[in-house]
Image (cartoon, rainbow, N blue to C red):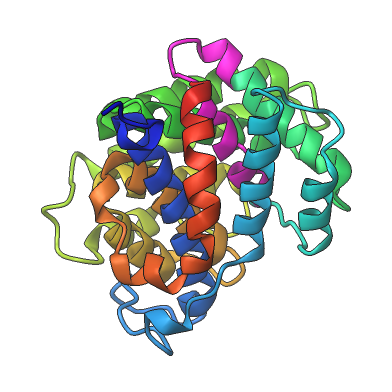
Amino acid sequence: MTSSPVDEPAGRRIAAALWGLACGEAVGRAWGSSRAASGLCTTPPAGPAGLRVGPATRLVIALARAVAAGEGRVDPSPPVEVAAALAGSAPGPLDPALWAVVAGLINRPDDLQWLVEDGVALVQAVAGAAPVPPPAPAALAAAAAVAAAVSAAVAGEGPEAVLDRATEAAAAAVGVAGSAAGGEEPAAAVAHALDTLRLTLAGRGAGEPPGHLAAILRSRWEPGLEPGRAVPFALVLAAACADAGRAVQEAAGAALPGAAPVVTALAGCVAGALAPASVPAAWTGALDELAQDMERLVPELARLR
């Protein structure tokens, strides 16, 4: 029997990335307001049954479906489905990083410049159709870092290599992102933030007690609504945990109010792609309305890589 793309390693990692994103946003929305002193949220108000699919997840899935239908083409005018998903959401300054996930799902990490340009173009296309200001240079550089991290994780690269790719992409994005209002300095700060947080962890990883990784990173800065800080925080935490459940819980405990849904979604997405079996079944079960979408979408995305 010939295996389908979803049975292949890349397909499984794409599925885990999307489920990690969906579960991360749901957990961030449910738990983000109840921050634990330990940096770990372990007691959701209503348990997994209280999790709901969030608007950012619906938009990412609509965007992924549109890109798959267009054979990987980034349309400067998003189709009706994407416009409808945008109409039902209120994108914040961190949301462009989530849109860039789609570029990481369909591109391999080998051609860095193409990946960066694809991620930035995708973000700019969605932002152009949304009732929000154009993404700032730091937001575009952060989006490029996310696209590269997701691409590398789906390709099966390890945590350190994933962060290397993200840092390279953030640096490569400066020329593109720096052309936006605000110049190159804010865009360049994203790569610097990634390096700073990696040095802050000093090689610590999953062997640390629960909550400790986020607490160490939070001692440097708390992830709020600044893309140049919140996105690197999520990526470094995800790589250090290499476990979607832990990364999401630690991110939810660390993020400032308003930032938690995106920070947890990014952490869950990248950690899920790194360790596909680590997305908690209780969480995916609570969001089972997405199952049919995933079943149809994942093979199409895997085919485009």
**What is the x, y in percent for residue 245?**
30, 61
Residue at 38 percent of width and 37 percent of height: 6
Residue at 37 percent of width and 47 percent of height: 16
Residue 279 lies left or right of residue 60; in this view the side is left
**What is the x, y in percent for residue 267?**
41, 52
Residue at 71 percent of width and 37 percent of height: 66
Residues in magenta, as a range: 95-115
Q: Is residue 105 magenta?
A: yes
For the N terminus, the image quarter is top left
- Along the viewing direction, whichever of 257 and 78 lies nearer the viewer: 78
Judge whether 114 appears above or below 212 on screen.
above
Judge whether 68 appears above or below 27 on screen.
above
Residue 70 lies left or right of residue 294; in this view the side is right
Residue 220 in view of the camera: yes
Judge whether 70 appears above or below 292 on screen.
above
- Along the viewing direction, whichever of 181 and 271 lies nearer the viewer: 271
